[in-house]
């Protein structure tokens, strides 16, 4: 895997320096319905889509950040720090260029 | 207190390596360090590739939202992420907006600040110098070491020989800072890769020759403007 | 590796051979009259120089212990030991060539169909097949001395191929201010032009001056004798350069890899003496080889005439130039030409003795026998487009050129020259310039336009008869492919896998075009409809050592600051993840006893250590741990487990509040990075939390002073008040130990009065030595991991990861008290809440087993003969006078006093469940 990922602090680095943290998702409220919690805990979304996802630069600055990636082409489109404007969780306005298939 | 202990003696992680390699050990400023390797004591440094163990340094980690202010206080101006700046106290490496590492004695004023943690002993430092330094590093890291990507005063955290290392580019040498628990692996990997370039180990007595005066930490040529 | 300037001597199968300066091994052998270099893979047919450009498998030999060296492109070195492969007992007389006569018993895919039945005979067949098959043998003795390297280089532009197009691409990119790396397989730049003096004359001094221009350009790094074998994501190009693998990362890549001359398929086309024209040229001009005797040249283009003229000038008698075209492809200038004819077959066994030629469409009987020593074919090129295909570029069949080429490029890639099917030198230079310009701009991709085809292709004769080899590597004939298609493997991908065509060392370079053509014909389809197989790395054969490199990180080992002290003290080390830890100092039982009766000291620096500062830390800890921390007083430490959202234990450790807003957290050995990452993720999800996390694991060493006499020892080197009143069990203090600022935690993992002492790493050896001196009178002993494991088992203290796994929740692992479901929210609360309302599953319980028999982990727990659980830890306990341990058992068996059976060495042994610690159950010793 020679994919390059842009770390907001360390610039572009080989993907092997990072750990993947899954798509950005909203954690349910503590009093949310059990089904919602079960879906959040056990269902790992695997979408053919452009999505925001967590990456951890484990072999360097050890900071978490968000990457917008097209899972169909494996193209990394941009990286942002958590809390920055413009990042959205899957199913929460994540842009769709092909929809779920 | 019942018995009075001997004054604390500090020791870096490579001291045993030096001892086995025939290095001369001395106590300097409370640290047991390798001052000399007899066979390289007279080496002409400009022509040779050398490594030197400089683990006997005070190190401070600055963190949190006030990192920038503290950096300004130490260097006189802010230091961009991915760069280092030289201040009176030492070299300040800015890793992220909220994190910086200071190599050198910063004094109690900074140390007592809640944003500072004394991490002396948490970073071991290897100095690498010589005409083939980049070639040796290129055998151990995927980093782009071209001057354009990694100019003087640039820093880069990432794997070297598989070990998370903070690499700092000075005018006449490179510094590799790593966790003491894995620095022996890094040291041996450097010596192994450097074998083809006749890389040699020198003692701390040559520190002043390898690390040019002033540390070469800050380049005032506006190199940070492009960031 | 540079060319020798003097002649060298090497041995080939024991015979001494002399090579001229810079001459290849195969070239020297050719001059020495050695024309059989190897035996073929399946039928052990004699094989000689064929492509002579490092593509085909015919010249593979073992050189100085390294198997499968392409001797036609490997310069001879003094004293080299070259051995032929795949022949027994000798190359000249290979017993296994009998297989050649058994062709009809060994149809394609025979190993899938025969020998598997009866099943019990397969191991016998397998050992025979393994001995007969395979190429070369790895010399286990010689491998160790070779040094393999891995290097990473970065370049704005990488140009692969130092031929005419590649040279111009490099110059153009350099002129545009980019730094360029030019990768060339051969020892010199210039590509095929080096082997074509006639074209060099046409170019005049442009040839040499262009090469000089590149070599002298400071912006161009030239890697000679370097082979690009893979293109990976984000423009990573893998290059083999001798024993080094270079990973080249570029912004723009120009592929100018040229093409490969393609062989014709006819019966006997693998006989020594049958060669490709480009190989003959290369051998003549680069290696100074002569081709004495008579030669027949078969061609459909001017290239055949060039090689014929060159051969004639060097003294070879040209018997005929057999031209597929009705009119000569170019002015024959006195050569004997037979137009509209082709080669039917060749005769000869160890070497060609004659060529049978005749009209393209004529019957076999129309063939005329021409006596000759050499048959040279110049029947066109295919593109070396494997790297383009790997990069994801689309390849299409270009009918006008009869070759596959890229027509749609991916971003960052550009192709130029013969790889596009362009062979005219000026057109190659133009394409090179354009590619260099595009790559310098960091773009590329999109459709490419190539120069129009230079001439129409002449028709070909279809091969007839047996032993017309499509694939030299795997001995696959045209007939084999037809049979395979008839067997139902009609798709090109399945045909490849079934027949193994294109799967040998050449990876399709000699046989892909031929196999596609055969597949198309067998299916009655066109070449385009047939398609091609997927190109994958490596594009050229690469030694495994080069791929492995020195891989230093594989040997990463982590050592604590006390490692050298442990060595001096005679420690026996064990691996704990990447860490080396003392398992014992020779006598774990004595170490155990010292802690129970006196005092011991263990290095626990491998624990993860995190400092958390800020006003929101208490809230954060309440959130990431299931138990409570908000009201933990300053100066207190508490045990905690970390669960994930599914309520599974992922780590455990201690949490100490040193100041109002300053906390000190420890994690298990080997999980410091994991917990650091876990905490940082939750902090990242809540940027509003004012918390600063500092991983001080590397900066802090830790040791545990434990045993009834530990207070007495510590008091000797510590000014603080250590009395139980002042510093009770679970107190956390910051004070000086042996003159060094330390964090002291009064905790008791081993079940005795004890202090976990955290000090700066660089002062650890000092503190440790002072403690050892202070404890000398009390009989202090250092103790290792083994003693610690026995000590903690007496107390039923679990080890996360040892006694728990990916299904263990604190509710089941004997820690239900730690889960505070009345807290409004914490990680894993929802899952633990659900679990607490269900029937309990397996429970982690202590058990006791009379006698000294110790069940190894993970022994099975059986109930009524059914597998119902497993042992996670067990040791003999002197204080319990029995073997004790921890095991997962069904909930209904988890009560005190229940009997379970544990299987040890196949025997069932009775054990009794015991829920309270085996030692000091009320903790009096801990709290003393």
Image (cartoon, rainbow, N blue to C red):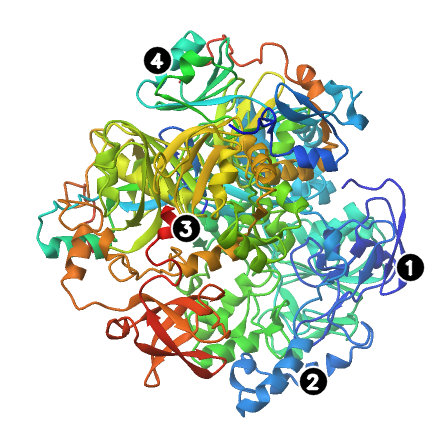
* Callout in the foreground (4, 1): 4
Q: Chain of mark 3?
A: C
Q: Do marks 1 and 3 share a chain?
A: yes
The span from disc 3 to disc 4 (Cα, nearest Å) is 43 Å
Seen from the viewer's position, the closer of residues A63 and C637 is C637
Where, quadrant-wise, is the N terminus of chain C in this rendering?
Answer: top right
Of circles 1 and 3, the one toward us is: 3
Report the mark closest to the observer, 3 or 4: 3
Residue C320 placement (x, y as % from top left): 74, 62
Q: Earlier in the sequence, mark 3 or mark 2?
A: 2
Badge 2: how crowded within 10 Å, few (<14), some, or many (20+)?
A: few
The local secondary structure at tag 1 comes to strand
On the rendered structure, is C783 left or right of C70? left
- Which residue appears at 74% of the width and 38% of the height? B20
Residue C749, numbered label: 3
User: Quick check: marks 1 and 2 in contact, CB under 8 Å?
Assistant: no
The residue under label 4 is B69
Q: Secondary structure at mark 3?
A: loop
* Residue C722, quarter of the rendered image: top left
Q: Dots 2 and 4: beta carbons under 8 Å?
A: no
Chain at tag 2? C
Which chain does the numbered disc 4 sit on? Answer: B
Q: Residue C202, can we see it?
A: no
Q: Position of residue C168 (x, y in %)?
A: 58, 31
Q: Are marks 3 and 4 on the same chain?
A: no
User: What is the distance, in whole Å, between disc 1 and disc 3 at their CAs?
Assistant: 72 Å
Discs 4 and 1 carry the same chain letter: no
Which quadrant would residue B66 be assigned to in this image? top left
Q: Which residue is label 1 attached to? A: C16
Compared with residue C227, is residue C518 higher up or lower down, i.e. above or below?
below
Q: For mark 3, does the 10 Å Cα neighbourhood hold few (<14), some (14 to 19), or many (20 or more) residues?
A: many
Secondary-structure class at tag 4: helix
């Amino acid at each position: 895997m020679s994919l390059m990922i842009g770390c907001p602090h360390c610039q572009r680095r080989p993907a092997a320096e990072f750990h993947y943290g899954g798509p950005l998702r909203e954690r349910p409220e503590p009093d949310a319905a059990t089904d919602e919690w079960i879906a959040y805990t056990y269902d790992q979304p695997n979408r053919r889509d452009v999505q925001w996802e967590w990456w951890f630069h484990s072999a360097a600055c050890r900071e978490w950040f968000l990457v917008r990636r097209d899972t169909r082409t494996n193209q990394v489109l941009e990286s942002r720090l958590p809390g920055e404007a413009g990042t959205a969780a899957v199913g929460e306005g994540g842009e769709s260029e092909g929809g779920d298939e | 207190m019942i018995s009075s202990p001997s004054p604390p003696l500090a020791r870096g992680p490579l001291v045993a390596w030096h001892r086995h390699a025939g290095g001369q050990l001395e106590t300097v400023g409370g640290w047991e360090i390798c001052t000399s390797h007899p066979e390289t004591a007279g080496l002409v440094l400009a022509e040779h590739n050398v490594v030197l163990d400089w683990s006997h340094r005070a190190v401070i980690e600055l963190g949190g939202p006030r990192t920038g202010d503290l950096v300004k206080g130490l260097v006189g101006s802010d230091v961009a992420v991915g760069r280092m700046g030289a201040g009176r106290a030492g070299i300040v490496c800015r890793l992220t907006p909220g994190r910086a590492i200071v190599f050198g004695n910063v004094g109690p004023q900074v140390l007592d600040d809640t944003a500072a943690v004394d991490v002396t002993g948490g970073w071991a430092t290897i100095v690498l110098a010589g005409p083939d330094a980049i070639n040796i590093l290129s055998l151990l890291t995927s980093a782009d070491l071209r001057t354009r990507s990694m100019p003087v005063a640039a820093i880069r955290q990432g794997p070297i020989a598989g070990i998370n290392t903070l690499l700092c580019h000075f005018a006449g040498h490179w510094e590799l800072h790593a966790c003491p628990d894995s620095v022996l692996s890094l040291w041996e990997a450097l010596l192994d890769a450097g074998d083809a370039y006749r890389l040699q180990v020198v003692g701390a007595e040559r520190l002043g020759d390898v690390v040019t005066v002033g540390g070469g930490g800050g380049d005032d040529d506006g190199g940070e403007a492009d960031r | 590796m540079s060319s020798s300037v003097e002649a060298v001597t090497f041995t080939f199968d024991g015979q001494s051979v002399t090579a001229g300066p810079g001459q290849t091994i195969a070239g020297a052998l050719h001059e020495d009259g050695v024309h059989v270099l190897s035996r073929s893979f399946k039928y052990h047919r004699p094989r000689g120089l064929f492509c002579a450009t490092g593509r085909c498998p015919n010249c593979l030999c073992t050189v100085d212990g390294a198997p499968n060296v392409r001797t036609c492109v490997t310069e001879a070195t003094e004293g080299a030991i070259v051995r032929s492969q795949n022949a027994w007992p000798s190359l000249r007389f290979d017993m296994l060539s009998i297989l050649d006569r058994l062709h009809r018993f060994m149809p394609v895919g025979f190993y899938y169909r025969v020998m598997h039945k009866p099943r019990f005979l397969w191991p016998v067949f397998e050992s025979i097949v393994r001995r007969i098959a395979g190429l070369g043998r790895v010399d286990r003795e010689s491998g160790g001395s070779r040094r393999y390297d891995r290097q990473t280089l970065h370049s704005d532009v990488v140009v692969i191929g130092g031929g005419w197009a590649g040279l111009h691409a490099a110059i153009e990119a350099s002129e545009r201010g980019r730094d360029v790396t030019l990768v060339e397989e051969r020892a010199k730049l210039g590509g095929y032009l080096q082997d074509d003096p006639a074209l060099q004359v046409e170019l005049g001094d442009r040839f040499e001056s262009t090469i000089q221009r590149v070599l002298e350009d400071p912006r161009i790094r030239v890697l000679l004798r370097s082979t690009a074998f893979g293109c990976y994501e984000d423009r990573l190009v893998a290059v083999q350069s001798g024993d080094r693998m270079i990973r080249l990362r570029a912004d723009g890549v120009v592929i100018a890899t040229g093409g490969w001359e393609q062989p014709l398929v006819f019966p006997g086309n693998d006989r020594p003496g049958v060669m490709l024209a480009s190989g003959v040229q290369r051998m003549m001009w680069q290696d100074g080889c002569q081709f004495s005797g008579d030669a027949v040249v078969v061609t459909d283009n001017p290239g055949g005439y060039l090689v014929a003229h060159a051969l004639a000038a060097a003294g070879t008698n040209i018997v005929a130039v057999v031209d597929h075209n009705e009119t000569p492809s170019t002015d024959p200038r006195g050569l004997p030409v037979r137009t509209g004819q082709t080669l039917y077959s060749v005769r000869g066994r160890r070497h060609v003795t004659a060529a049978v030629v005749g009209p393209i469409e004529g019957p076999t009987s129309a063939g005329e026998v021409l006596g000759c020593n050499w048959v040279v074919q110049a029947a066109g090129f295919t593109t070396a487009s494997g790297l383009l295909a790997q990069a994801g570029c689309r390849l299409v069949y270009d009918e006008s050129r009869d070759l596959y080429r890229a027509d749609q490029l991916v971003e960052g890639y550009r192709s130029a020259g013969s790889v596009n099917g362009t062979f005219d030198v000026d057109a190659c230079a133009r394409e090179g310039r354009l590619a260099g310009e595009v790559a310098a701009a960091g773009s590329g991709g999109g459709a490419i336009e190539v120069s129009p085809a230079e001439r129409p292709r002449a028709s070909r004769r279809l091969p007839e008869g047996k032993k017309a080899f499509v694939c030299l590597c795997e001995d696959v004939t045209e007939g084999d492919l037809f049979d395979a298609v008839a067997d139902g493997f009609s798709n090109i991908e399945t045909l490849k896998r079934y027949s193994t065509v294109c799967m040998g060392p050449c990876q399709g370079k000699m046989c892909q075009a031929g196999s596609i053509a055969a597949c198309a014909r067998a299916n009655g389809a066109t070449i385009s409809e047939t398609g091609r197989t997927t190109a994958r790395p490596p594009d050229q054969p690469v030694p495994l050592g080069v791929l492995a490199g020195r891989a230093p990180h594989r040997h990463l080992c982590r050592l604590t600051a006390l490692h050298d002290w442990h060595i001096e003290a005679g420690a026996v080390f064990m691996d704990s993840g990447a860490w080396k830890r003392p398992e014992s100092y020779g006598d774990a039982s004595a170490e155990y006893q010292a802690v129970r009766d006196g005092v011991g000291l263990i290095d626990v620096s491998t624990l993860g250590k995190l400092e958390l500062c800020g006003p929101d830390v208490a809230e954060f800890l309440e959130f990431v741990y299931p138990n409570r921390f908000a009201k933990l007083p300053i100066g207190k430490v508490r045990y905690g487990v970390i669960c994930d959202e599914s309520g599974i234990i992922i780590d455990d450790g201690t949490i100490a509040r040193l100041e109002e807003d300053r906390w000190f957290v420890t994690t298990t050995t080997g999980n410091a990075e994991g917990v650091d990452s876990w905490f940082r993720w939750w902090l990242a999800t809540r940027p509003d939390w004012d918390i600063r996390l500092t991983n001080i694991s590397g900066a802090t060493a830790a040791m545990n002073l434990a045993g009834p006499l530990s207070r007495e020892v510590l008091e000797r080197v510590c000014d603080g008040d250590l009395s139980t009143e002042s510093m009770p069990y679970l107190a956390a203090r910051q004070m000086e130990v042996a003159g060094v600022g330390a964090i002291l935690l009064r905790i008791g993992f081993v079940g005795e009065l004890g202090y976990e002492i955290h000090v700066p790493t660089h002062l650890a050896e000092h503190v440790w030595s002072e403690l050892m001196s202070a404890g000398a009178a009390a009989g202090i002993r250092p103790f290792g991991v083994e003693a610690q494991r026995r000590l903690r088992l007496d107390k039923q203290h679990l080890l996360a990861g040892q006694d728990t796994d990916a299904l263990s929740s604190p509710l089941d692992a004997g820690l239900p008290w730690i889960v505070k479901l009345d807290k409004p929210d914490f990680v894993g609360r929802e899952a633990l809440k659900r679990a607490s309302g269900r029937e309990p599953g397996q429970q982690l319980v202590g058990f006791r087993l009379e006698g000294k028999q110790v069940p190894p982990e993970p022994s099975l727990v059986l109930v009524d003969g059914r597998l119902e659980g497993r042992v996670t830890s067990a040791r003999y306990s002197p204080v319990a006078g029995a073997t004790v341990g921890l095991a997962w058992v069904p909930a209904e068996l988890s009560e005190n006093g229940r009997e379970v059976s544990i299987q040890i060495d196949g025997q069932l042994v009775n054990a009794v469940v015991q829920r309270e610690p085996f030692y000091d159950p009320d903790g009096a010793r801990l709290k003393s």
